[in-house]
Image (cartoon, rainbow, N blue to C red):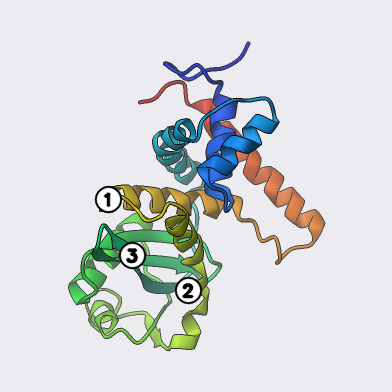
């Protein structure tokens, strides 16, 4: 018997597959629609947009609960400029030394108060201090370090933070593909969900042997598919 979400005429597995494709790969909504059509499944790009908007954050929340990541004690922090309807915002991102995303927060300012607010949010989620905090030369980080992370080492050097600058790339690519985010709230929700999805599904294609990579990807896909099936309705 085919398993459906309450109120949906499309099986869970197809909705989940479509949402995963959109978040995991550099695909547009129309690309996903065409891939489904090749499999004999008709779904407009607007339908896929609605699935991604509705179910992406739900899957992401479940993935966070299932994985309960233990992050490395070296943190890399950086901010990325985002333009939304003519206004400039700053997307603050924190990853650990292994490239796992810990937290993201879209804020209007790029000052010390914003840095402190962001780090407080991250510390609340993790409940532990890092051993090392790596930032660029933005002076706001010095105050945030002094206020919240005085006990940890603060390394401030542009070249030390290449890892997190690379971590911005998926967000930047999706922003470009969407032709910009529509609102700050929708941007925050999407980027936060994207981080949780990629934490699970990016399993080191170039870091592992083919055999190890396949094993890790199979495990990640099993977790994702279990997440899709475990939801019985839209709550």
Q: Does residue 128 appear to the left or right of 37 in the view shown? A: left
Q: Does residue 234 appear to the left or right of 202 in the view shown? A: left
Location of residue 131 in the rendering, given as x and y in whole percent from the top left corner: 43, 76
**Other-residue count near label 1 (Cα within 10 Å), few / some / many at <14 / 14–19 / ≥20:** few
**Other-residue count near label 3 (Cα within 10 Å), few / some / many at <14 / 14–19 / ≥20:** many
Q: Name the residue under label 3.
A: 82
Q: Is residue 6 above or below residue 90?
A: above
C-alpha gap between disc 1 and disc 2: 23 Å
- Element type at marker 1? loop
Q: Is residue 161 above or below residue 54?
A: below
**Other-residue count near label 2 (Cα within 10 Å), few / some / many at <14 / 14–19 / ≥20:** some
Please identify, in this view, whether the residue under mark 3 or under mark 2 is nearer the observer.
3
Quadrant location of residue 223? top right
Location of residue 25 in the rendering, given as x and y in whole percent from the top left corner: 59, 51
Q: Which of marks 3 and 1 is nearer the N terminus?
A: 3
Q: Do the residues labelled 3 and 1 touch (CB within 8 Å)?
A: no
Q: Mark 2 points at which residue?
A: 165
Location of residue 218 in the rendering, given as x and y in whole percent from the top left corner: 71, 44
Residue drawn at x 30%, y 84% is: 138
Q: Does residue 207 appear to the left or right of 61 in the view shown? A: right
Q: Quadrant of the C terminus?
A: top left
Q: In which quarter of the image is the N terminus?
A: top right
Q: Earlier in the sequence, mark 1 or mark 2?
A: 2
Q: Total label count?
A: 3
């Amino acid at each position: 018997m085919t398993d459906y979400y309450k109120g949906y005429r499309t099986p869970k597995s197809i909705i989940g597959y479509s949402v995963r494709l959109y978040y995991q790969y550099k695909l547009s909504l129309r690309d996903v629609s065409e891939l489904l059509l090749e499999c004999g499944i008709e779904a407009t790009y607007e339908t896929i947009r609605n699935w991604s908007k509705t179910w992406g954050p739900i899957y992401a929340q479940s993935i966070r609960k299932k994985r309960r990541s233990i992050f490395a004690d070296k943190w890399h922090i950086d901010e990325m400029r985002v333009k939304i309807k003519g206004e400039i915002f700053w997307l603050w991102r924190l990853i650990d030394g292994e490239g796992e995303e810990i937290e993201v927060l879209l804020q209007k300012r790029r000052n010390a108060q914003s840095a402190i607010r962001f780090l407080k949010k991250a510390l609340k989620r993790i409940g532990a201090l890092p051993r090392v905090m790596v930032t660029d030369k933005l002076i706001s980080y010095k105050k945030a370090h002094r206020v919240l992370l005085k006990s940890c080492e603060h390394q401030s050097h542009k070249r030390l933070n290449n890892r997190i600058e690379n971590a911005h790339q998926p967000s930047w690519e999706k922003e470009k593909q969407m032709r910009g985010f529509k609102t700050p709230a929708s941007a925050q929700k999407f980027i936060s969900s994207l981080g949780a999805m990629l934490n699970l599904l990016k399993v080191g294609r170039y870091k592992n042997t083919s055999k190890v990579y396949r094993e890790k990807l199979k495990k990640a896909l099993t977790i994702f598919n279990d997440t899709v099936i475990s939801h019985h309705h839209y709550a």
